[in-house]
Amino acid sequence: MIEKEQIIHAYNYRHACKEFDQNRKIREDDMQFLLETARLTPTSFGMEQHRLLHIKDEKLKARLKPACWDQKQITTCSDLIAIKAVTEKVKPGSEYVKSMFGRRGLPEDATQAYLQRYENFLSDKDIECWAQKQCYITLGNMMSAAAMIGIDSCAIEGFETQKVEEILRIDTTKERIAVIVAFGFRINEPGKKYRLDMDELVEVL
Ligand SMILES: Cc1cc2nc3c(=O)[nH]c(=O)nc-3n(C[C@H](O)[C@H](O)[C@H](O)COP(=O)(O)O)c2cc1C
C-alpha cells in the first residue's frame, strides 16, 4: 500500500492547472494508466454509466476551445478527455441493464431481484443527473491518480454543453457530455490553495 504522506502530497500537488506546457506530452503508458483508473472506477449498481472520449486531435481541440469559454487548457493540454454519461441504455428494462446484471452470473431469481430493485431505485430519479454523477467519480479518480504520478490536470465544467455536444457529434437522446478534463504538465506554479478548516468541513454527530 502507498504511504499516507505520499497520497496527501499528491493531493496538495494537484491543482486546477490553467495552462499546460505544450512541449510536454504525456507518455502513452501513463495515459493508459489514467484510463485504467477510469475503467476501475466504481459506479452505482455497477452500471458503468460513463464513457470517455479521448481527444488527441489538435484541430478538434481548437474547435472545442471557443465552446469551452475559450479556456487555454483545452488547446495547451497534452490529452483532453470528455466524460460522457450514458442515459438511454441505463433505463430500467433495457438489454444493456439486463446484460450488466446478467454478467455477474447470479442465479436467475437473484438477477430478477436486482432488476426490480434497480427499477424501483430509479423510479423517482432523474436518470440523466444520476448518470452524470457517476462521471464525476471517474473525474475525481483520474485527477487524483494523475497527481500521484506527477501529471497535472484541470476539470472543466465551463463549457456550452449544446455546442460541445454538436462538435463531438453526441446523440443527446442517448448520451450527454457530463464534464471535461485536461491532462498535461504545468507551465506556471500554482497559487495558494484555499480550503475550509477541518471543523468547518466535518460535523461530528
Ligand atoms: C467539476 C469541476 C469543474 C471545474 N471547472 C473548471 C473550469 O471550467 N475552469 C477552470 O479553470 N477550473 C475549473 N475547475 C477548477 C476549480 O475551480 C478548482 O478545482 C477549485 O477552485 C480549487 O482549486 P484547486 O483545484 O487548484 O485546488 C473545476 C473543478 C471541478 C471539480
Image (cartoon, rainbow, N blue to C red):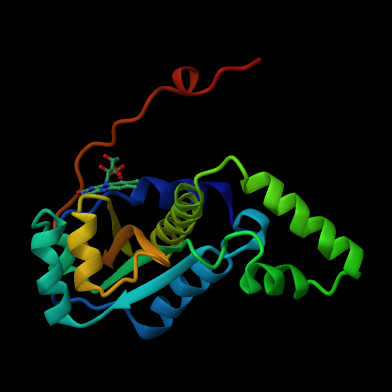
**Relative side of 137 to 59, left or right:** right
Residue located at (26% from left, 75% from top) = 169
Q: Quadrant of residue 85?
A: bottom left
Q: Quadrant of the C terminus?
A: top right
Image location (x, y in percent) of residue 164 = 21, 64
202, above or below 176, in the image: above
Residue 185 visible to an observer of this rendering: no
Q: Quadrant of the N terminus?
A: bottom right
Q: Nearer the viewer, residue 186 or 134?
A: 134
Residue located at (57% from left, 47% from top) = 4
147, above or below 75, in the image: above
Number of numbered callouts drawn: 0
Q: Quadrant of residue 79?
A: bottom left
Residue 201 visible to an observer of this rendering: yes
Q: Nearer the viewer, residue 89 or 137?
A: 89
Image location (x, y in percent) of residue 99 = 70, 74
Residue located at (24% from left, 56% from top) = 161
Image location (x, y in percent) of residue 139 = 42, 57
**Relative side of 12 to 16, left or right:** right
**Relative side of 74 to 139, left or right:** left
Split into quadrants, the picture shows ligand 1 in the one at top left
